[in-house]
Image: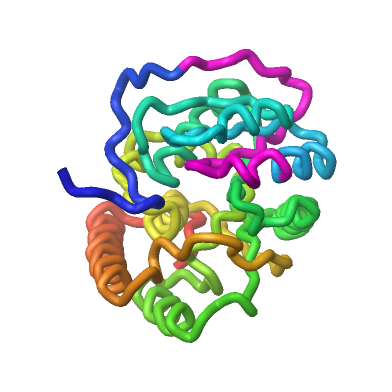
Amino acid sequence: MRSTGYGECRPLPQHLPVTIPDVPRAATCLAIMPARDEAPTVGAVVEGVRQTLGCAVLVVDDASTDDTAAAARAAGAIVLRLPLGLGAWGATQTGIRYARREGFSQVITLDADGQHLPESLPVLLAAMGSSGANVVIGTCVTRLSRAKRVAWQYLRLLTGLKLTDFTSGLRLYDAHAIEVLAGQEASLLDYQDVGVLMLLSRAGLTIAETPVAMEPRSAGHSRVFASWPVVARYMMHTTVLCLAQLDAVRRHGRPAGADP
């Protein structure tokens, strides 16, 4: 079986044996963190989100081998433990499906490793309120390497999406975006970036960006830019995905209200 890096996912089984806990329904926003082996940092991030927004926090433990689930639960998070690793997008979609089932109208996704600062989350909410966008992405341009800038320029030309950062996991989704991303079509995606954004755009939803501060990566490395072979594989995979999505738009047409 081919090994997968974190950020890639396997198809989600139809009847995944995950225990779903009860959750208070006072807030309309749910913060979702996919996490694999993030025990040293996840608790502080959970506490920061709860103090900043006062919303429920869901940590989707993607088959961790450490105490990620216990640390998240001790900090006050709701925890879903996946019996097998689905990767960052598979874990995130699990959380989005949970949010739809529980009636949340907004979802914020962020990393569990401390790169995304809880104090930046109100900026995303304000940007959605002022722009009326269905999706808001938090971006930090100063963290983009030269390789990423070149890659993103290529993806902007290929997809037509006028975005600064395609891989930022700091995002705010409204109810319309939640509905799209909880669907079966989104389960076929391997990454949470370009495929998700093209799917949302094809559904006629609007995407905005807002600048935020981010912390540098304290451990590990980028799943996409770990090495040149990984970069090449990612760009080839993404090119094929983009061409397939663009072909679907050509054959079936673009929904009313979709960006050109």
Percent of width and height locating residue 89: 42, 45
Is there any visible trace of residue 65 in the rendered image?
Answer: yes
Residue at position x 56%, y 35% from top? 68
Question: Hey, which quadrant is residue 11 in on the image?
Answer: top left
Residue at screen point 40% across, 35% down: 183
Q: Quadrant of residue 164?
A: bottom right
**Residue 99, above or below 126:** above
* Quadrant holding the N terminus: top left
> Quick check: is 199 in the magenta stretch?
no
Residue visible at 57% across and 29% down? Answer: 69
Q: In this rendered view, identify the residue nearer to me: 179 or 240.
A: 240
What residue is rendered at 73% in x and 67% in y? 213
Left or right of 166? Residue 4 is left
> x and y percent of residue 239 in the render?
27, 68
Q: Left or right: where does residue 151 sit relative to residue 177?
A: left
The number of numbered discs placed on residues in the rendered structure image is 0
Instruction: Estimate the x, y position of residue 85 in percent, counting from the top left.
Output: 36, 37
Q: Quadrant of the C terminus?
A: bottom left
Q: Which residues are magenta?
A: 19-44
Q: Nearer the viewer, residue 238 or 218?
A: 218
**Residue 74: x and y, percent?**
70, 27
**Is residue 31 one of those drawn in magenta?**
yes
